[in-house]
Image (spheres, rainbow, N blue to C red):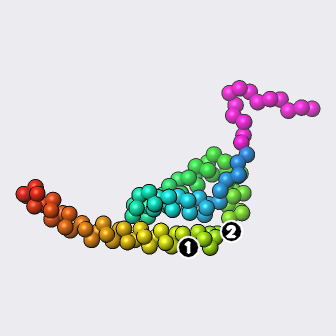
Amino acid sequence: MSVPPPLLDQPVPARRNLTTPRDRFFWWYSGALLLTGPFGFVVGPLMARRASRKAARLYPAEARVAQARDRGFAWWQWWVMTVLTMLGALGAFAVLSGLPMFLFVLYAQLGL
């Protein structure tokens, strides 16, 4: 007995090898910190959570398999995230320390 071919309007279920949730978090967090600077502290985790939810919605069985094989962060991921977090914190400090002078110059230029 052979399996009939799928109909044209029905999608074929795809088997995917999804990344683990912690790997997904690492890549989103690192990329967001590199591309958006201090805003990556917020953008990275939010996008990682969004990607995890999307993967769980589209591929529920594969998402459970990926979560089951998740062993945590590797040593090199810890080092990369530590360095990027320190650089992001320095960038946030630089932005916040320059904010009073920026507001003063803006006030002086507008003549309020």
Residue 108 at what x, y percent from top left? 10, 61
| Camera-side residue of 108 and 1 | 108
Question: Counting residues from the N terminus, which is met first, the one under dot 1 or under dot 2?
Answer: 2
Query: Secondary structure beneath disc 1?
Result: helix
Q: Which residue is mark 1?
A: 79
Q: Residue 45, labelled with which disc?
A: none
Quarter assignment of residue 23: bottom right
Residue 88 location (% of width, % of height):
41, 68
- Stretch of the chain drawn in magenta: 1-14
- CA distance separating discs 1 and 2: 17 Å
Q: Nearer the viewer, residue 68 or 82?
A: 82
Residue visible at 15% across and 59% down? 106
Task: Please report contact status of discs 1 and 2: CB closer than 8 Å, yes or no.
Answer: no
The amino acid beneath tag 1 is: Trp
Residue 3 on the magenta span: yes
Asked if residue 42 can be seen in this view, the reply is: no
Locate residue 24, reporting x and y percent. Answer: 59, 58
Q: What residue did someone put label 2 on?
A: 71
Q: Is residue 26 magenta?
A: no
- Rendered view: 97 above or below 26: below
**Residue kind at label 2, given as amino acid type:** Arg
Looking at this view, name the residue that lies furthest to the left.
Answer: 111
- Quadrant where the C terminus is found in the figure: bottom left
Q: Which secondary structure is most common in the magenta stretch?
A: loop
Q: Residues within 10 Å of mark 1 (few under 14, many from 20)?
A: few
In this view, which residue lies farthest toward the top? 8
At 50% from the left and 58% from the top, the residue drawn is 31
